[in-house]
Amino acid sequence: MKKVINTLLGVTVCLVTLSACNNVENKKNKDMTTHEHADKESVYACPMHPEVTGKQGEKCPKCGMDLKAVNPENAVAYEVQLTTSPQNVEAGKPAQLKLAVKQNEKMVALDILHEMKLHLMVVSGDLIWFRHIHPEEQADGAYAITETFPAGGKYLLFSDFKPSGGEQTLNKQEIDVQGKSSPVNNDISTKFISKVDGYTVTLLNGSDFKTNKTQHLEISIEKDGKKLIEKDLQQYLGASAHIVMIGKVGKEFLHIHPVSDSRFPVFAQTQIEKAGIYRMWAQFKIDGKVHTADFTVDVTEGKKGENEDKSHAHHH
């Protein structure tokens, strides 16, 4: 068994429904997540942008999140331990991934969050291959799942969970898969239309993605010449759809859950902090099957103060 202990640096990253949950810069195998405990001497900071501080009741100007009380001296560290079986993971062969969330070497209980206790997004280093999976709880309190990687190379694992009594947390890890690598894909051209399982899924405003604003995600779904509406979709993880965005260069991570809108079957709002190329995966469920559409967007730098819309984000 190969043990990898990742400790997220800094404060707990609190994911936000419809608000971008950007992963802070992590060091491989040296990342630490923390759960802040507030007291009367606490300062207030943004869970997603810890460099932003202020007073109680204020909001982060970057993402609109409420500032949370933070007392670094009382921070409690969580460790996410990853083991793989077999020890050397090979492309094309099933491998078990097992994650254990611990505090002071003891297992930490997790609450159900968006219908699951642990969400795991696995993506290839070139952001072409994507999987959203849900490891199952084991008798020892860890979470395990079997996955087969399509090619050799580096893969990123983003796990999303909420410790009981703690804040919703994002953890990033990396694993190396042995075997023949896929050809290097340097194609950074934008992609706003995705055809999957007979559905044509379109990111209608894909050419208008900018930073420094409340960014809308307007997605249409069509099949056999019929445009679908929200009621044609089944609930998936407690929402009409599920969206993930990851930056191509810095691997910034945004976790988005849509809200209802009469104009589009899938509609969301988020905040994108850094300009650049992003890959996006939108998942929706129809007739019991989950379909995954992928897009590529080029986020440009927006003018500061351009944000005039109020985010519909629901904070956790």
Image: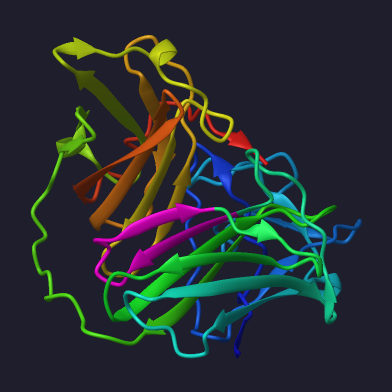
Residue 127 drawn in magenta? yes
**Residue at the image position 71 percent from the left and 53 percent from the top:** 162
Query: Residue 273: image x %, image y %?
Result: 38, 53
Q: In this view of the protein, which residue sits in the foreground, 77 or 199?
A: 199
For the C terminus, the quadrant is top right
Q: In this view of the protein, which residue sits in the foreground, 27 or 149?
A: 149
Q: Answer above or below: position of 8 versus 111.
A: below
Residue 161 drawn in magenta? no
From the viewer's perspective, tell me whether residue 106 is left or right of residue 220. right
Query: What residue occupies the far right of the structure in this picture?
Result: 40
Q: In this view of the protein, which residue sits in the foreground, 233 or 147?
A: 147
**Number of numbered discs present?**
0
Q: Answer above or below: position of 315 versus 140.
A: above
From the viewer's perspective, tell me whether residue 303 is left or right of residue 93. left
Q: Answer above or below: position of 271 versus 160.
A: above
Q: How is the image coloured?
A: rainbow
From the viewer's perspective, tell me whether residue 45 is left or right of residue 63. right
Is residue 213 shown to the viewer in this render?
Answer: no
Predominant SS of the magenta segment: strand
Query: What residue occupies the far front of the structure in this picture?
Result: 93
For the N terminus, the quadrant is bottom right
Q: In this view of the protein, which residue sits in the foreground, 310 or 279?
A: 279
- Magenta stretch in the rendered image: 119-133
**Residue at the image position 20 percent from the left and 47 percent from the top:** 297
Query: Residue 125: image x %, image y %?
Result: 30, 72
Q: Answer above or below: position of 177 versus 57.
A: below
Is residue 141 shown to the viewer in this render?
Answer: yes
Query: Residue 79: image x %, image y %?
Result: 71, 76
Identify the image quadrant of residue 11: bottom right
Identify the image quadrant of residue 186: bottom left
**Residue at the image position 20 percent from the left and 19 percent from the top:** 223
